[in-house]
């Protein structure tokens, strides 16, 4: 909880810096502060949800985090149609102002309290989360055994320990999923969707972007309902396969457009196909590769390395996101078809990665998941 409270402060200062910016240096400073705050929140929230949720609801509750993100993106798209960017930055402060007092009404993570040795507080927090009439004896004993097992070993983690399967395998899976989530180019497509739609012949690019945001919300909401029914692996494989097919359609459309005459009906049809491919790609991403990598990461990392490993995985995710966002316009100027062909190959690699390495975590407690890596 303290981490979220700390993260809200640079977010508030960052939005104020952007809103009252006098030159580009203020914008960079504001974005830097925002990145620091959002980086903490993007890791802390899924871990907190995973630690407090019952194992049979953890997937759906964990996906609510990404659903909230997509709703926020859609709201920013809609507000951006009517207000200036300075006012939009001021409005960005409101969620942070609500977050800080709201945290006082949220119980601390029972697993974190148990790890800190606060036994009475840990049991009280778990009882509040499960309901005062619920029998928490079995869950309390599982958490106590897990904490006792982790503290019976050396408390300090060394690089040599990462050679052990129970550490390197979940770390590799977590980092791999969060990196591949961005390498598919989704953020580049979303951030430059207006340009992509205009290059495809859609004049009202802003309206199309809002439509993409709405599709994200609907698809992520469906994934939230589905993830505890079908499982994580099948959604990840379906999502990355759908992205690969959609991106291939966009790549082929742009390649063929370069050969067709701008006055021909084929040119118009190819423009429509490229837009359909982009929309399907966003839809497929939102069904699995959007919400589930964060969920998997919060489930599989061992308690002993969760703080450090989760921070590294989050750092890599946002670094790759920055690289994709910065290179997307350059790649699109070089070759629209080539850009989407590259993203297609990375999506195909994601299917292979998930099929080989990612375990199914549906219906298992966090303790059972972490024990399976030993």
Image: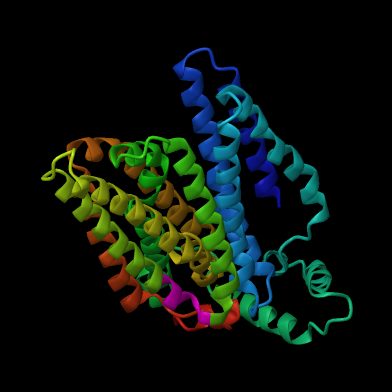
Residue at 18% x, 43% y: name it.
264
Q: Main secondary structure of the magenta part?
A: helix
Q: Which residue lies furthest to the right in this view?
A: 133
The boundaries of the magenta stretch are 230-236
Residue at 69% x, 41% y: name it.
95
Residue 79: x %, y % from top left: 61, 34
Q: Quadrant of residue 350?
A: bottom left
Q: In which quarter of the image is the C terminus?
A: bottom left
Residue at 28% x, 57% y: name it.
247
The vertical placement of 17 against 330, above or below, is: above
Residue at 36% x, 44% y: name it.
188
Give the left or right position of residue 257, taking residue 285 as reference.
Answer: left
Asked whether 115 or 312 is in front, the reply is 312
Q: Which residue lies furthest to the bottom in this view?
A: 138
Residue 91: x %, y % from top left: 67, 32
Asked whether 219 or 10 is in front, the reply is 219
Q: How many labels does the image show?
A: 0
Report the coloring of the rendering.
Answer: rainbow
Is residue 29 rendered magenta in the image? no
Give the left or right position of residue 52, taking residue 335 as reference.
Answer: right
Asked whether 36 or 82 is in front, the reply is 82
Residue 298: x %, y % from top left: 54, 65
Is residue 235 rendered magenta in the image? yes
Q: Quadrant of residue 240?
A: bottom left
The vertical placement of 86 against 120, above or below, is: above
């Amino acid at each position: 909880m303290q981490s979220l409270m700390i993260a809200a402060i640079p977010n508030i200062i960052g939005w104020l810096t952007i809103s009252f910016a006098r030159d580009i240096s203020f914008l960079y400073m504001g974005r830097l502060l925002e990145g620091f705050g959002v980086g903490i929140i993007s890791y802390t929230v899924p871990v907190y949800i995973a630690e407090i949720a019952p194992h049979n609801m953890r997937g759906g509750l964990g996906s609510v985090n990404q659903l909230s993100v997509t709703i926020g993106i859609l709201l920013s798209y809609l507000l951006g149609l009517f207000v200036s960017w300075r006012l939009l930055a001021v409005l960005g402060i409101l969620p942070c102002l609500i977050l800080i007092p709201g945290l006082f009404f949220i119980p601390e993570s029972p697993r974190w309290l148990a790890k800190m040795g606060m036994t009475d507080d840990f049991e009280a927090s778990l009882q509040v989360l499960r309901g005062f009439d619920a029998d928490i004896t079995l869950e309390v004993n599982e958490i106590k055994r897990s904490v006792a097992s982790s503290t019976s070993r050396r408390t300090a983690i060394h690089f040599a320990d990462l050679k052990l399967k129970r550490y390197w395998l979940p770390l590799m899976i977590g980092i791999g999923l969060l990196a591949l989530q961005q390498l598919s180019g989704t953020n580049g497509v979303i951030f430059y969707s207006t340009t992509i739609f205009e290059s495809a012949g859609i004049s009202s690019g802003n309206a199309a972007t809002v439509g993409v945001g709405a599709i994200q919300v609907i698809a992520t909401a469906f994934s939230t309902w589905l993830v505890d029914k079908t499982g994580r692996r099948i959604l990840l494989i379906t999502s990355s396969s759908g992205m690969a097919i959609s991106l291939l359609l966009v790549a082929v459309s742009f390649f063929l457009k370069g050969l067709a005459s701008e006055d021909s009906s084929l040119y118009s049809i190819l423009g429509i196909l490229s837009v359909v491919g982009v929309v399907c790609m966003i839809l497929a991403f939102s069904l699995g590769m959007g919400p589930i990598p964060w969920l998997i990461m919060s489930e599989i990392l061992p308690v002993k390395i969760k703080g450090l490993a989760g921070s590294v995985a989050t750092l890599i995710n946002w670094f790759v996101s920055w690289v994709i966002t910065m290179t997307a316009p350059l790649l699109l100027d070089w070759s629209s078809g080539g850009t989407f062909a590259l993203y297609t190959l990375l999506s195909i690699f994601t299917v292979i990665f998930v099929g080989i390495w990612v375990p199914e975590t549906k219906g298992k407690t966090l303790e059972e998941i972490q024990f399976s890596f030993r």
